[in-house]
Amino acid sequence: MANLSPHHAVYAGSFDPLTLGHLDIIRRGAALFDRLTVGIGINPDKRPLFTPDERLAAIQQVVAPLKNVVVKCFEGLTVNFVRSCDAAVMLRGVRTLTDIETEFTMTLANRALDPEIETVFLMASEKYSHISSSLIKQIAHLGRGNTAEQLKAFLPLELIEPLLVKVGR
Ligand code: ADP
């Protein structure tokens, strides 16, 4: 069995699109661990707004200043992806008590699948705890007035224009 590094964490999600909440977890994770891999999960059952390649390019652009962060796409179970990176840590962000309940169940399942991988949680910053990718997509689709200006509170500046183009605005 490979030697998994406790200094390397994997932060996995759909990131459709990456939000300021996700970016906050990435920055804090990158400060805690020597290496952080952001894993974009490709789930055939979901119909994402952005293709995996679009999400990969967007996140790579945003995290470019963080030298210990790499971004990859993956298919299949997250624990398998974490192991394939030789990382011992799965990093998750939690926003609400409901998040904790879901994450708790998932952590137990992941532990049963691969007991050598430890899940570490970071609590969302209060500034970002209300932000989700689905909320951002709703605002982009339905927002009135200066939507680009409104979106500044939710997602990285570089991603606002591509989002508005994607939804045809
Ligand atoms: P998933 O499809 O796995 O829910 P997401 O892209 O929605 O993927 O989220 C990835 C991870 O980021 C999850 O651990 C989620 O709880 C966390 N997360 C999502 N939004 C925020 C936020 N605003 N602040 C902190 N963590 C967040």
Image: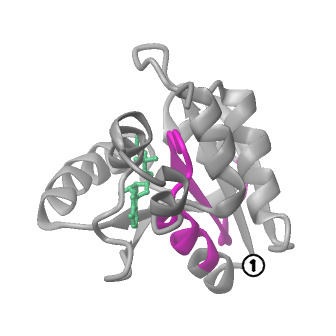
Q: Locate residue 98: give its quadrant.
A: bottom left
> Which residue is at 39% across, 39% downward?
113
Find numbered disc 1 in the image and state the secondary structure of the residue it sits on. Answer: loop
Q: Image height check: is 17 above or below 36?
A: above
Q: Mark 1 is on which residue type?
A: Asp
Q: Quadrant of ligand 1?
A: bottom left
Q: Quadrant of the C terminus?
A: top right
Position of residue 151 measured from the top left corner of the image (x, y, whole percent): 49, 58
Q: Which residue is mark 1?
A: 34
Give the camera-side residue of 161 and 105: 161
Horizontally, residue 96 falls left or right of residue 48, namely left
Give the camera-side residue of 23 and 43: 23
Using the rendered image of the protein, determine whether residue 4 is visible from the camera's viewpoint: no
Q: Is mark 1 within 8 Å of ligand 1?
A: no
Position of residue 115 measured from the top left corner of the image (x, y, whole percent): 42, 53
Residue 33 highlighted magenta (yes or no): no
Using the rendered image of the protein, determine whether residue 97 is visible from the camera's viewpoint: yes
Q: Which residues are magenta?
A: 2-27
What colour scheme has been applied to the protein in the rendered image? one colour
Give the camera-side residue of 144 and 33: 144
In this view, the residue farthest toward the top is 44
Position of residue 94 measured from the top left corner of the image (x, y, whole percent): 31, 66
Residue 6 highlighted magenta (yes or no): yes
> Which residue is at 66% across, 79% downward?
33
> Which residue is at 20% across, 49% downward?
105
> Which residue is at 31% across, 71% downward?
129
Q: Locate residue 155: give its quadrant.
A: bottom right
Position of residue 28 measured from the top left corner of the image (x, y, whole percent): 57, 81
